[in-house]
Amino acid sequence: MAAKAVKTIGVLTSGGDAPGMNAAIRAVVRVAINKGLKVKGIMRGYAGLLDEEIVDMDTTSVSDIISRGGTILYTARCMEFTTPEGQQKGADICRKHGIDGIVVIGGDGSFRGAGKLSALGINTIGLPGTIDLDIACTDYTIGFDTAVNTAMEAIDKIRETSASHERCSIVEVMGRNAGYIALWCGLANGAEDILLPERYDGDEQALINRVIENRKRGKKHNIIINAEGIGHSASMAKRIEAATGIETRATILGHMQRGGTPTCKDRVYASIMGAKAAMLLAEGKSNRLVAYKHGEFVDYDIQEALNMTKDISDEQYEISKLLVR
Ligand code: ADP
Ligand code: F6P
């Protein structure tokens, strides 16, 4: 796509919030201003765009936010923007406010919207912001590192009480349909079992047999990390208790995984990605998604990126099994 100079850019966060989004917003705003662009904040994602919730931002608008989780721009989901009429309205509102470029921080759904805005003549750059790590073109998404550290600490605590009571514990972690959070927590917490949507064959009897074997081998606790994409942790706990005679509890960690102080990695990577997004817009680029691949920050065409696929690492999964037996 031919480069088109932009003067004023907007920045919005869309879909589920993720720790590090504020660091990304800060970087977009400061780098864009340093490159001579004006910046407007669009509140509440595409919903706020259609409601014209648009505010001027300067370098002080993003002071004191790098250490805060959540997103100062708020986030929302917006059905109207999934329609061609909604997208045209969004592009018209951008023009009305003099916005000729937008940085969209969110997940795949948000990038589909960004692609549509780009096709309607508004330069768009996407930044991968989701705790789920489920964006195919990138090895890193803003928020994953904080979320897995939060979940890991919570599971350490569950493990202590579980061991004291000689119980089995099922801990359900987020991730929508992806098992990245579950796999990383499983490795980090030394879980006895990790149930991933990408790999779980539904063989609950085998799971029960492993719980019984572990107890026979003298294990005082039995931590099973269950991914949200499999779910049903409470009923699974009841069935395991009935079949093994071992007291079993289920804990769903839930939204605590989305909050909290972003880790150093999330702050640094989100800052670099935000800076890259502003630079791409300043260079007149559009329809690009900033990613981290094979140790480098890169950018892809949005449609190409959305057509990519990825899977959890077989190597990591196999190693996780070898570490507990
Ligand atoms: P995420 O961006 O985290 O994947 P969603 O899938 O909920 O989260 O998408 C966020 C928002 O992006 C939606 O509420 C909607 O406004 C917009 N969106 C999602 N899919 C599309 C689409 N196919 N076309 C245009 N906009 C979309
Ligand atoms: O995409 C992030 C995420 O937290 C997923 O892990 C989870 O499935 C979903 O969002 C929960 O969404 P909501 O906050 O709308 O309940």
Image (cartoon, grey):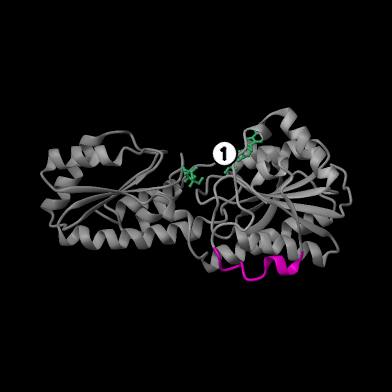
Whether residue 316 is visible here, answered yes or no, is no
Q: Main secondary structure of the magenta part?
A: loop
Q: Secondary structure at mark 1?
A: loop
* Left or right of 14 on screen, residue 256: left
Q: Which residue is mark 1?
A: 309
Magenta region: 58-68
Q: Give whichever of 302, 158 is nearer the camera.
A: 158
Q: Position of residue 319 (x, y in %)?
A: 36, 53
Q: Is residue 238 above or below residue 37?
A: above
Asked whether 59 falls inside the magenta stretch, the response is: yes
Q: Amino acid at mark 1?
A: Thr
| Residue count near mark 1 (Cα–Cα under 10 Å), binned few <14, some 14–19, many ≥20 | few
* Left or right of 197 on screen, residue 20: right
Identified at 74% across, 36% down, the residue is 116
Q: Residue furthest top?
A: 84
Number of numbered discs visible in the structure rendering:
1
Q: Position of residue 147 (x, y in %)?
A: 46, 57
Q: Quadrant of residue 267?
A: bottom right
Q: Position of residue 112 (x, y in %)?
A: 67, 37
Whether residue 70 is visible here, answered yes or no, is yes
* Left or right of 316 on screen, residue 160: left
Q: Position of residue 86 (x, y in %)?
A: 72, 32
Identified at 42% across, 60% down, the residue is 150
Q: Quadrant of the N terminus?
A: top right
Q: Quadrant of residue 63?
A: bottom right
* Left or right of 297 on screen, residue 190: left
